[in-house]
Amino acid sequence: MKKLENKVAVVTGASKGIGAGIAKGLAAEGASVVVNYASAKAGADQVVAEITAAGGKAVAIQANVSNEADITRLFDETAKAFGAVNILVNNAGVYKFNTIEEVTAEEFHNQFNTNVLGLLLATKGAVKNFAPEGGSVINIGSAVTAITPPASSIYTATKGAVDAITGVLAKELAPKKIRVNSLNPGMVETEGTHTAGFIGSDFQHEMVRTTPLGRLGQPDDIADVAVFLASEDSRWLTGETLLASGGVR
């Protein structure tokens, strides 16, 4: 029997990159997966197509995680498609590196609205729809909280908030049998890191040089850890921060 047979998972921001990898990884272990997206419908539909072609179950549902009405609709549509939720992966996130001279209120709110408020609202919505036996919330943090690179003050602050929220919610939701852990990747090669110009840059070369395992992460590297956190294999873990960075810290 697959590890996540008969489980229902919602993965936010799953139209590409790490989120898409996690969605496919959960589905491969038997979960019925909601592939959430904000605007990239084509990407989400492609992820669903790949999951179903492999014999899995998935649907794409649009929702902006920082919008409360969207979150309500996301979980209403999830219930109609698959029933109660067992797994929530708070993956939706944005990032932009700014020096302190470039910091603006607009950019602060842009990143915090998605990375922090979005996580809180999605978790609030999921808790109302979790199955009675509880389940797992997986917050996607970042190794930036450990390595604090220059020009990342806003982004690193959002991910520091994710780590702190993880600890709070692990205690708060434990009576409901909901475990909450943070999965913090290092640099991962995705469409986003290519678009942002990280791949091929001096920053990438420095990251590889300082990574003990000697390479960038791939979405599958993160997806396998997410499967572990979603499954009964991690039943005794909550409030943990797992640094999945190839040894960077």
Image (spheres, rainbow, N blue to C red):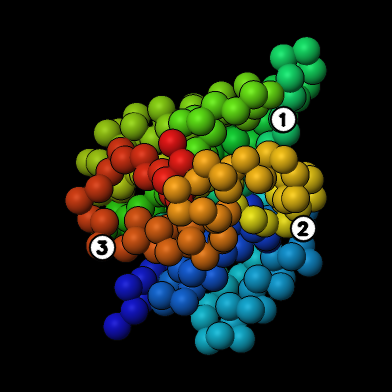
Q: Is residue 58 above or below residue 174?
A: below
Tell me the element at label 3: helix
Mark 1 or 3 closer to N-term? 1
Q: Which numbered tag is attached to residue 97?
A: 1
Crowd band around label 3 with a 10 angstrom C-alpha radius: few (<14), some (14–19), many (20+): some
Crowd band around label 2 with a 10 angstrom C-alpha radius: few (<14), some (14–19), many (20+): some
**Corner quadrant of residue 19:** bottom right
Tell me the element at label 1: loop
**Corner quadrant of residue 224:** bottom left
Residue at (57, 54) in percent of width and height: 216
Residue at which label 2 appears: 40
Mark 3 to mark 2 CA distance (whole Å): 32 Å
Location of the N terminus by quadrant is: bottom left
Mark 1 or 2 closer to N-term? 2
Q: Nearer the viewer, residue 25 or 135?
A: 25
Residue at which label 3 appears: 232
Say whether residue 162 is visible: yes
Type of amino acid under label 1:
Phe
Tell me the element at label 2: loop
**Corner quadrant of residue 155:** top right
Mark 1 to mark 3 CA distance (whole Å): 37 Å
Where's residue 249, x and y in %?
44, 36
Q: Nearer the viewer, residue 119 or 175?
A: 119
Q: Nearer the viewer, mark 1 or mark 2?
A: 1
Residue at the farthest top position: 101
